[in-house]
């Protein structure tokens, strides 16, 4: 193994936590005496941080402990496996909000006006294009940039085919099928893996059908009012054609909805399979195994003919906002602002984001090299503007309900038309989030 045993154990523990996604517990907690890089926070101030990114909980806890040695504000870091909106609503109902909350973009739009501090005057605003503004006020601090596509193991591909692998040559569904066929001919029995999790299928793959439209809002409105027939939509069918290549060549095809995420990612890491749809967050699992160094993310090949097969889908992912209620004092607000500035401008803060958490920074002033190959791929696409933006307004239950329908398709329990019908039925009553 290329990482320390303890790193493997921690990663596996976190993966198991994700598998228990229905739990209502609050997860791990860390308390440490900490302070601010700006020097304006009192040593008696306490702040709480809600972390909704399971993969970095242990890093958050370790950071808080180290941060405390140089400062004087007590920090508690919390994680919950509940949906962000549900978890935060219980905290607000109890008049016990977090000082800083890490949420999804849609949560900023729904919560900011009532619950968030205006951060427009902060220095970091000028150094990012990913901050969330509402009515001219900045509320959302971008934690990182993430993107989705097809993760590939170039080393495994080249070993089987005997040829250098250039992901930029895989643009169409036919290109993708051809490389899969070449791998099978070379002895790789099943070159692909498919994560069966509802969030991967519903929130990530299906979402690209909306995100790759010219006007996602209009497209979803069309599904709702019947003017868009999903089963007839060119983008839906183009992406589903590519998904079928993944599905039909899946190592776990016979029991696709029983495949465990960590098993799939281990097979990809170690070269037993060559392709898997996912995002750069998957490195937190892959790096626990004896991984190939030559890996990356490429756009989802498809036959849309609109250039989407040369772009990843992504952007700012996870946002911090600072609570504005009377439960949070002015001193706590300042300590929270100082912490955010520490992440952007302090060398230790930058290293925490880029090296410890293996995240792609959302700030132009951070020039540290992204250590992992998936993050490096994302940064390369982001730097050249080859990124299709996330659609951040899907309802909270979208991934669970449409993901369940997608799982039926993955398992062969319904066909494409049946899947399209279930998605259409979902949108007949669902409403997109405020924006």
Image (cartoon, rainbow, N blue to C red):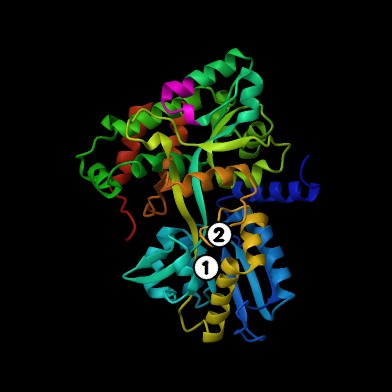
Question: What numbered label is drawn on residue 143?
Answer: none
State how far apart marks 1 and 2 are (Cα): 8 Å
Residue 304: where, in percent of width, then height? 33, 31
Residue that numbered label 2 is attached to:
52
Quadrant in the picture for residue 270: top right
Q: Nearer the viewer, residue 105 or 256?
A: 105
Residue at (32%, 61%) from the top-left corner? 434
* Tags 1 and 2 touching, CB below 8 Å: yes
Eyeballing the image, is 426 above or below 267?
A: below
Pick the quarter of the image with the N terminus. Answer: top right
Q: Which of 137/83 is in front?
A: 137
- Was residue 165 drawn as part of the magenta stretch in this picture? no
Where residue 55 appears, as percent x and y from the top left, is 62, 53
Secondary structure mainly formed by the magenta segment:
helix
Residue that carries the numbered disc 1 in the rendered image: 101
Q: Which residues are magenta?
A: 168-177
Report the residue that reaches farthest toward the top.
185
Q: Residue at x 58, y 45 (%)?
A: 376
Q: Is residue 403 visible?
A: yes
- In the rendered view, tell whether residue 131 sits above or below residue 418: below
Q: In the image, is 133 to the left or to the right of 344?
A: left
Residue 53 x, y percent position in the rendering = 57, 56
Find residue 433 and report its horizontal and vertical position in percent. Answer: 34, 57
Above or below — where is 394 with respect to 98? above
């Amino acid at each position: 193994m290329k990482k320390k045993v303890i790193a493997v154990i921690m990663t596996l523990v976190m993966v198991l936590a994700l598998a228990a996604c229905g739990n209502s517990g609050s997860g791990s907690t860390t308390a440490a005496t900490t302070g601010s890089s700006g020097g304006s926070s009192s040593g008696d101030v306490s702040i709480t941080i809600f972390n909704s990114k399971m993969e970095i909980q242990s890093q958050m806890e370790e950071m808080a402990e180290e941060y405390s040695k140089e400062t004087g504000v007590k920090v508690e870091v919390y994680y919950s496996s509940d949906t962000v909106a549900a978890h935060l609503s219980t905290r607000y109902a109890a008049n016990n909000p977090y000082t800083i909350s890490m949420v999804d973009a849609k949560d900023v739009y729904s919560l900011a006006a009532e619950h968030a501090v205006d951060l427009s005057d902060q220095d970091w605003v000028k150094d990012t294009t990913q901050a969330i503004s509402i009515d001219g006020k900045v509320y959302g601090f971008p934690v990182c940039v993430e993107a989705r596509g097809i993760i590939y193991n170039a080393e495994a591909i080249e070993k089987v085919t005997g040829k250098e692998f250039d992901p930029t040559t895989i643009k169409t569904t036919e290109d993708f099928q051809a490389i899969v066929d070449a791998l099978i001919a070379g002895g790789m029995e099943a070159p692909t893996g498919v994560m069966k999790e509802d969030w991967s299928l519903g929130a990530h793959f299906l979402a690209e059908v909306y995100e790759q439209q010219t006007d996602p809002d209009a497209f979803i409105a069309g599904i709702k009012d019947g003017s868009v027939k999903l089963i007839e939509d060119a983008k839906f069918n183009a992406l589903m054609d590519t998904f079928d290549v993944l599905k039909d060549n899946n190592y776990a095809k016979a029991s696709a909805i029983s495949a465990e995420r960590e098993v799939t990612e281990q097979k990809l890491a170690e070269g037993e399979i060559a392709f898997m749809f996912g995002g750069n967050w998957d490195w937190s699992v892959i790096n626990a195994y004896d991984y190939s160094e030559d890996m990356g993310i490429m756009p989802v090949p498809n036959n849309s003919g609109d250039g989407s097969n040369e772009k990843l889908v992504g952007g700012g992912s996870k946002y911090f906002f600072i609570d504005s209620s009377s439960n949070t004092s002015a001193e706590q607000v300042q300590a929270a602002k100082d912490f955010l500035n520490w992440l952007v401008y302090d060398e230790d803060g930058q290293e925490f984001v880029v090296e410890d958490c293996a995240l792609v920074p959302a700030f132009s002033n951070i020039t540290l090299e992204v250590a992992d190959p998936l993050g490096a791929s994302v940064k390369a696409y982001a730097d050249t503007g080859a990124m299709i933006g996330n659609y951040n307004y899907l309802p909270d239950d979208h991934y669970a309900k449409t993901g369940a329908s997608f799982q039926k398709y993955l398992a062969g329990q319904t066909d494409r038309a049946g899947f399209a019908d279930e998605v259409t039925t979902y949108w007949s009553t669902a409403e997109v989030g405020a924006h």
